[in-house]
Amino acid sequence: MKGLTPPQRLFLTEILKKRLIIGHPKYQEIEKDLAKRWAGYWGEIALANYVKELPHDKYLIFHDLQLQYNGIHFQIDTLLLSRNYILIIEAKNIVGTLTFENTFKQLIRTHVDGTEESFEDPRVQCQRLQSLLRNWLIKNHCHLLPVDTLIFFKSTSTILKSNAGDKTDFSKICKGRDLFNKIEKMEQTYQQERIDTITMENIAKLLLQQHSPKPINILKECNLTEKDTRNGVCCPNKECNYIPMNYKRGNWQCPSCKTTSKTAHLTSLTHFYYLSKPTITNQELRVFLKLPSPNATQKVLYKLNLQTTGKTKDRLYYLRPEEVAMCVLS
């Protein structure tokens, strides 16, 4: 019903990393955050590859579903909708030795050198999602199915344990293909059909209609401004990514790796769209792309053929961003 696409926060962080001023004090922090987001995305991809094997006549599958309840945005990695029950599955891609600590409800990873790292307890996260989804269903007059949860760990080499004396319920936690065994047990628990196929499809349509990603201002969230980022066209060579390229007679030339391109500015305008705003003026375009003259700016604008409003100096050009998955995450 809804396929998996790169999370908005992931590609925004990817763009920010490319554009951040060289040597910026927050570079390592953003790079570390980006690595975690990539790991999370790979976990969601692994989960998606498993659940697509489920029978299509039994389950409707939603990936990265984002809903609102009373102004609260909440995101579900994978949701399975059937005639018997709804299952929320949260994907985790954390490797190593993980301990579920029950006193303070946290997940602790122990590194080889003995140091520890704390994560939010996914059981608490799932309980919160379960409560929000139930309330959302009630508010939309379709609370007809029980809602259950499951936590999926991508790596089968991950070691899961609890502290001595703690009674941790691992019945709703799985690794790899054990996912299917857990879902079979869910089906044994929820054997009764509570809705018909038409009602199930109506609930599915409502979920899709109300899918609403939360707007993200990545610069504001990182306490940055446009002054912290670099202007200029980014080299399309993935091994280079040099900024800025030089413009000469309709071509962009990279002074670092000597790559040339006629369209490299399109990806950079996508960066402007997501980091700054969806419109741009003639002067802003010239400054951002580092074009050498007003004449060159006019030539670029003419070829872009963008929708406009206003006249002369007040004219706004409306950007059409490329497919982000292609231009940023390929």
Image (cartoon, rainbow, N blue to C red):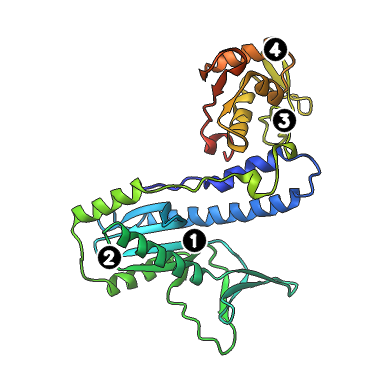
Q: Residues within 10 Å of mark 2 (few under 14, many from 20)?
A: many
Real-space CA distance between mark 2 and mark 3, rounded to the nearest whole angstrom? 52 Å
Locate residue 271 relative to residue 138 in the image: left or right.
right
Quadrant that contains the C terminus: top right
Counting from the top left corner in percent of width and height, residue 103 is at: 58, 82
Query: Residue 145, which numbered label?
Result: 2
The residue that mark 3 highlights is: 231
Mark before the other along the chain sequence, 1 or 4: 1
Counting from the top left corner in percent of width and height, residue 136 is at: 35, 59
Real-space CA distance between mark 1 and mark 2, rounded to the nearest whole angstrom? 22 Å
- Asked if the residue at tag 4 contacts the one at tag 1, i.e. Cβ–Cβ closer than 8 Å, the answer is no
The residue that mark 4 highlights is: 294
Counting from the top left corner in percent of width and height, residue 310 is at: 53, 17
Identify the secondary structure beneath mark 3. Answer: loop
The residue that mark 1 highlights is: 91
Mark before the other along the chain sequence, 3 or 1: 1
Q: Residue at x 59, y 55 (%)?
A: 39
Locate residue 165 relative to residue 241 in the image: left or right.
left
Mark before the other along the chain sequence, 1 or 2: 1
Q: Residue at x 38, y 70 (%)?
A: 182
Mark before the other along the chain sequence, 4 or 2: 2
Identify the secondary structure beneath mark 4. Answer: helix
Q: Residues within 10 Å of mark 4 (few under 14, many from 20)?
A: few
Counting from the top left corner in percent of width and height, residue 30 is at: 69, 50
Q: As shown in the figure, which amino acid type bears the numbered disc 2?
A: Leu
Identify the secondary structure beneath mark 1. Answer: strand
- Asked if the residue at tag 2 contacts the one at tag 4, i.e. Cβ–Cβ closer than 8 Å, the answer is no
Q: As shown in the figure, which amino acid type bears the numbered disc 3?
A: Asn
Identify the secondary structure beneath mark 2. Answer: loop
Which label sits in the foreground, 4 or 2? 4
